Image (tube, rainbow, N blue to C red):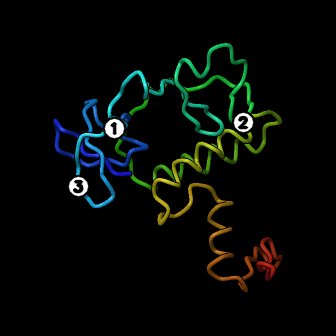
């Protein structure tokens, strides 16, 4: 759902409205691009603010939803969750972000703990925001190449390092 901030007159994807816009006054789209007051578009006792996000699966929770929880209610990981209040917006070039992503993913793959998966999950959430951009990991880039060119083979020094994608 797309919402419109009453104060800054900007439009936001409902999923990201609280992390991008500093205001808490939104009008909801009725599905016909008519923006009007909608109780679901405002914070209320019936729709409290999400305050925490699972670093692994990305699911957001209110304080009440996490009362007495010892792990993520959605994916059951026990890692430390993120505080949504600490979300930031940064300006970075996609190529620079790819460099960070490739290094982080390669390092995480060398570890033998839950860091291996969590770095990939974070990178996947970033990639979903820009699905047409080049993937942020080498593995993701090779996978996309295999999807676009299923018969292609990647070779290094006369040796096949990535075989063609097998037909479904």
What's the residue at 37%, 24% (across, down)?
44
Foreground disc of the pair 1, 2: 1
CA distance separating discs 1 and 2: 27 Å
Side of 97 where 155 appears, left or right: right
Determine whether the residue tagged by mark 3 lies in a helix, strand or loop. Answer: loop
Disc 1, SS: helix
Residue at the extreme bottom? 151
C-alpha span from label 2 to label 3:
36 Å
The residue located at (47%, 66%) in the rendering is 132
Residue 136 horizontal side relative to residue 133, left or right: right
Q: Residue at x 62, y 15 (%)?
A: 67
Q: Are marks 1 and 3 in contact (CB under 8 Å)?
A: no
| Rendered residue at 40%/42% (across/down) | 16
Label 3: which residue? Answer: 34
Residue beneath disc 2: 75
Q: Which mark is residue 41?
A: 1
Q: Position of residue 32 (x, y in %)?
A: 28, 61
Q: Residues within 10 Å of mark 3 (few under 14, many from 20)?
A: few
Give the CA separation, mark 1 to mark 3. 14 Å
Counting from the top left corner in percent of width and height, residue 1 is at: 39, 51
Asked which quadrant contains residue 71, the reply is top right
> In the picture shown, does residue 133 fall above or below 65?
below
What percent of the width, then of the height, locates residue 100?
54, 46
Q: Earlier in the sequence, mark 1 or mark 3?
A: 3
Query: Residue 54 in the image: x percent, y percent?
Result: 61, 31
Precedes in sequence: disc 1 or disc 2: 1
Mark 1 neighbour density, 10 Å: few (under 14) some (14–19) many (20 or more):
many
Q: Earlier in the sequence, mark 2 or mark 3?
A: 3
Q: Nearer the viewer, residue 40 or 115?
A: 40
Q: Nearer the viewer, residue 158 or 143?
A: 143
């Amino acid at each position: 759902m797309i919402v419109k901030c009453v104060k800054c007159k900007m439009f936001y994807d409902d999923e990201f409205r609280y992390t991008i816009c500093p205001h808490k006054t939104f009008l909801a789209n009725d599905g016909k691009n008519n923006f009007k007051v909608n109780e679901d578009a405002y914070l209320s006792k019936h729709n409290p603010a999400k305050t925490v996000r699972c670093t692994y699966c990305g699911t957001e929770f209110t304080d009440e939803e996490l009362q007495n929880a010892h792990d993520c209610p959605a994916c059951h990981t026990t890692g430390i969750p993120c505080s949504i209040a600490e979300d930031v917006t940064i300006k970075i070039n996609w190529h620079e972000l790819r460099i960070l992503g490739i290094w982080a993913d390669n390092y995480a793959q060398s570890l033998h703990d839950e860091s291996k998966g969590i770095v990939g999950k974070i990178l996947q959430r970033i990639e979903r925001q820009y699905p047409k951009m080049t993937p942020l990991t080498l593995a993701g880039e090779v996978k996309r190449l295999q999807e676009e060119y299923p018969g292609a083979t990647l070779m290094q020094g006369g040796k096949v390092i990535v075989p063609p994608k097998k037909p479904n």
